[in-house]
Amino acid sequence: MGPHPAVAAIRLAVRRVLHDVLTDLQRTDTPRTDTPRTDTPRTDTPRTDPPRADAQRSPQHVPAPPADPARPAQPHPPHGQAPAPLVLVACSGGADSMALASALAFEAPKLGIRAGGVTVDHGLQDGSDLRAAEVVARLTALGLDPIESVAVDVGRDGGPEAAARDARYGALDTVADRHGAAAILLGHTRDDQAETVLLGLARGSGIRSLSGMAAVSGGPGADRRYRRPFLHIDRQTARKACMVQSLPVWDDPHNTDPAYTRSRLRHEGLPALEKALGKGVVEALARTAQLSRDDADALDTWAAQAEASVRDAAGLLECAKLYALPPAVRRRIVRRAAIEAGAPAGALFARHLEEVDRLITGWRGQGAINLPGKVVAQRQGGRLVIRQGC
């Protein structure tokens, strides 16, 4: 008899992603990223010079226990050979990430991949350090190695949810760089994707926001670092996989706290939509995310190819040539120019781009447009000039 259907589903999803990671490693022409840097201290020694002091306080390396005979052993290369590629799982201890960790621990050794884990302590709840230690113990029991627990300081920029996310990804990037990890697996499910699409819709930020989370995304210097194997798997399947494997899970109280927008959407908004529209809303929203991402990627490519044709010999954007482009392509070029001038991408909204776009399509002698990051956009002699202001 094979594994329970829920367990089979999560393992298949992880197996496919690990195959993709290996394919990417084979295709790259650059040196493999699975060799840890030699200029960093041992991971069982506290770092005194973390790259991001605002996102990491106390990394902790935990050695793996003796191998479980029921689980494939972690691969070890012969003496003198480069180590096998390392894939890490980001684990909070919740059902989604624990299911992901169990599937990685099972599938990785069969493909000659080392499996490790990272848990991030955001320090936002009493006893969070103890819960992080529990997650480390659970990952250790699964046979993952290396394992790190990283405490972060969460700032305030962008609100509590955004600040926690920024601190978390900063810590994950630091750990991945230190160990030379080929990829980090994240446990976002189809339900998470549906929530992200609705949040983007509420912001009115355009098709890119509706595209939700990418199955593959990047970090600093690693544009395919993050992998999300469960975007086509629902939350209940992940929880069922934990239950049938007797994996303990932790339910974060923040996930049910109405103070958080995503929590209200999860427990009030989506149920109301399903009551009004019927079952299948989550699946439809996830499908919308993929279709929107495909369209957004195509438009981004078009804009990148068209940009050179709308600049003059001095590199300035020519308004007449911009005007001839479709609005979706034109605004992408303008947005990229604003970001290159210093406007923070996360603070550059559709309303900013619409104001700049009117300098091209509705020129009536209006003055300069102030953008985030002290960037100024103005029309001068038929050119759109976007630069740092005073």
Image (cartoon, helix red, strand yellow):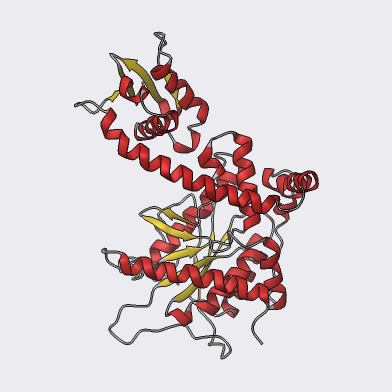
Considering depth in this image, is 366 or 94 the residue closer to the camera? 366
* The one of 255 and 190 positioned closer to us in this rendering: 190
In the rendering, at what x and y percent does residue 374 appear? Answer: 41, 26
Res. 41 visible in picture: no
Q: Position of residue 377 (x, y in %)?
A: 38, 21
Instruction: Tell me if 159 is positioned left or right of 185 in this view.
Output: right
Residue 264, compared with residue 3, is above or below; it is above
Of 272 and 254, nearer the camera is: 272
Answer with the quarter of the image where residue 239 lies.
Answer: bottom right
Q: Nearer the viewer, residue 206 or 387?
A: 206
Q: Quadrant of the N terminus?
A: bottom right
Pick the quarter of the image with the C terminus. top left
Question: Which percent across, then down, holds residue 72?
Answer: 51, 86
Furthest residue in direction left, as rendered: 313
> Residue at left 48%, top 24%?
354
Q: Residue at x 37, y 43 (%)?
A: 301
Residue extending farthest top:
365
Which residue is depicted at the point 45% across and 28% down? 372
